[in-house]
Image: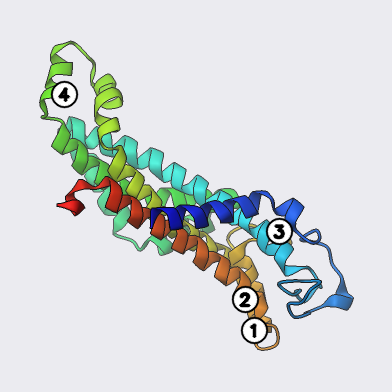
Amino acid sequence: MVAAGASLLLFLTAAALAGPWLAPSHPDEISLEESLLPPGPGHPFGTDYYGRDLLSRVLAGARVSLAISFSAQLVALVIGVSLGAAAGYFGGWVDWLVCRLVDIVMAFPDLLLAIGIAASLGPGPSSVLLALGLVGWPGLCRVVRGEVMALREREFIDAARVAGAGDWWVIRRHVLPNVAGPVIIATSLGLGSRILQEASLSFLGLGVQPPTASWGSMVHLGLRWLSRAPWLVVFPGLAVALAVLASNLLGDGLRDVLDPRLSD
């Protein structure tokens, strides 16, 4: 499962990066005489209402959608690991405060909260990135907090303290390396959620604005021609599905490999 998920995700990422060289034409090139052409030799994915090559736009949308999703998951990772490590290691009021923040964020559905944040910041990729990062960290925080609480009373942690090591040095050198496995698993599984949420926000018009392509906005624009040109929805929708499937396969496979509790 790890190999399948990683291979599929690498394939999509490589296709996105190589898009400018793989695309048959510029994604924004308009050719009205080729409007709504079905998939064929000249246009493998067909064309949209403006005669733009759909394969070129799917590849361009991959760069936008995957870049935002990866970046948002990185933001969630930094926030979640930092707060989770502090809460689990120090306990007391720090743990109480972090847990209350987690409770507040998790009291709202992820997508609904992301829509509210992105709408308040205004449409654009940076708004979507920040919104998804701010709704994605609580799960990682809870994973890290639980693992750190189990580690902080271990003998090697006590030995480092007795040797005079500072708290943050202990966290950085001894605690975080020992929670890397669960963090990698949670990050991989969370990436699929970020991809799907990014597509949802773009579908609602909160992401990149036309004519820039993203998978979600392409699905939205294709809906009005669904009965006449279903390929406008099928191909970007399939790209989203494959990206989510790849991240879930990767996360599940890594969990089987890295989590020893599943092999007992």
Left or right, residue 33 beside residue 180: right
Q: Which mark is residue 157?
A: 4
Q: Position of residue 198 (x, y in %)?
A: 52, 59
Q: Where residue 99 sits: x, y (%)?
A: 22, 45
Residue 79 appearing in the image? yes
The residue tagged 1 is 226
Q: Residues within 10 Å of mark 4 (few under 14, many from 20)?
A: some
Instruction: Give coordinates of residue 40: x percent, y percent.
Output: 76, 77
What is the crowding at mark 1: few (fewer than 14 residues within 10 Å), some, or many (at least 20)? some
- Establish if 97 lies above or below 169: below
Please say if 71 is above or below 85: below
Return the disc, 3 or 4, that comes first in the chain's sequence: 4
Q: CA distance from mark 1 to mark 2?
A: 7 Å
Q: Callout 4, which amino acid?
A: Ile
Residue at figure coordinates x 18%, y 11% from the top left: 164
The residue labelled by disc 3 is 212
Residue drawn at the location 22% of the way across and 36% of the way down: 87
Residue 253 relative to residue 72: left or right:
left
Q: Amino acid at mark 2?
A: Val
Helix, strand or loop for disc 2: helix
The answer for how far apart the CA atoms under marks 4 and 1 are is 60 Å
